[in-house]
Image: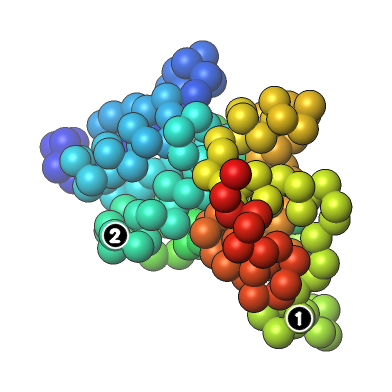
């Protein structure tokens, strides 16, 4: 099959061994070709601009930019690449933040190789591809009678507020973790929860929403 007939894919994950395994799974399908790999979010976004692939398979937690931030920026820049999240996280805040940001697929790293390839083909064809467990969550959430995050955001916890204040000062996840005595991964989880509660996709939107709600002040953004 000619290269130009294949679905062109980029792969982003900060673990080389995981990336190698996923690439092997993808390229078992003769319709798919991995044209480039990235080990952080900044590189992933750069590859999307440079190669203009059909589909990007992204981990959520990566250095530089998270998968969520990559998806959000790609949509802002109107890049044509369709994005699939491939992650170990199956918690609601991650799922709904990714889908709200514009992800066309959300799969868990326990996904079978054939299912991953099938998802890439589906997303390339303009459909959505969700892990069966994720689909159940989405259906359940949509079936709830009143979800009014846009009108009345759910209150963030005191710890989440601490994280948000430090994020408002421009601190990285690592710096926030050092200051609060928690891991970088925990900081990322808190931010995902904040995004879900406030119905936003980025730190800037979260800070602005919190300021409008009176939860943080302008003074919290300096220091």
- Badge 2 or badge 1: first in the primary sequence: 2
Q: Residues within 10 Å of mark 2 (few under 14, many from 20)?
A: few
Residue 197 in percent (x, y) is at 74, 64
The reply to whether residue 30 is visible in this rendering is no
Q: Residue at x 37, y 28 (%)?
A: 38
Q: Which residue is mark 1?
A: 152
Instruction: Quote the CA–CA distance across marks 2 and 1.
Output: 29 Å
Q: Residue at x 38, y 54 (%)?
A: 73
The reply to whether residue 42 is visible in this rendering is yes
Q: Quadrant of residue 187?
A: top right
Residue 98 in percent (x, y) is at 57, 55
Q: Quadrant of residue 205?
A: bottom right
Q: Residue at x 67, y 80 (%)?
A: 150
Q: Which residue is mark 2?
A: 77
* Numbered marks: total: 2
Residue 40 in percent (x, y) is at 43, 29
Q: Quadrant of the C terminus?
A: top right
Q: Is residue 201 left or right of residue 38?
A: right
Secondary structure type for disc 2: loop
């Amino acid at each position: 099959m000619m290269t130009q007939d294949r679905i062109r894919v980029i792969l982003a994950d900060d673990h080389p061994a995981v990336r190698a395994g996923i690439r092997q799974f993808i390229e078992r399908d003769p319709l798919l070709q991995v044209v480039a790999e990235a080990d952080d979010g900044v590189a992933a976004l750069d590859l999307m601009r440079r190669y203009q692939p059909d589909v990007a398979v992204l981990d959520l937690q990566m250095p530089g930019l998270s998968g969520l931030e990559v998806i959000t920026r790609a949509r802002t820049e109107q890049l044509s690449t369709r994005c699939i999240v491939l992650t170990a996280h199956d918690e609601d805040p991650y799922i709904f933040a990714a889908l709200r940001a514009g992800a066309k697929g959300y799969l868990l790293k326990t996904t079978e190789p054939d299912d991953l390839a099938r998802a890439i083909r589906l997303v390339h064809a303009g459909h959505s591809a969700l892990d069966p467990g994720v689909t159940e969550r989405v259906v359940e959430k949509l079936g709830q009678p009143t979800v009014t995050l846009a009108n009345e955001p759910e209150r963030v916890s005191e710890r989440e507020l601490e994280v948000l204040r430090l994020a408002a000062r421009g601190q990285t996840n690592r710096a926030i973790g050092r200051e609060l005595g928690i891991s970088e991964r925990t900081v990322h989880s808190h931010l995902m929860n904040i995004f879900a509660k406030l119905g936003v996709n980025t730190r800037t939107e979260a800070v602005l929403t919190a300021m409008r709600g009176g939860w943080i002040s302008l003074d919290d953004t300096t220091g």
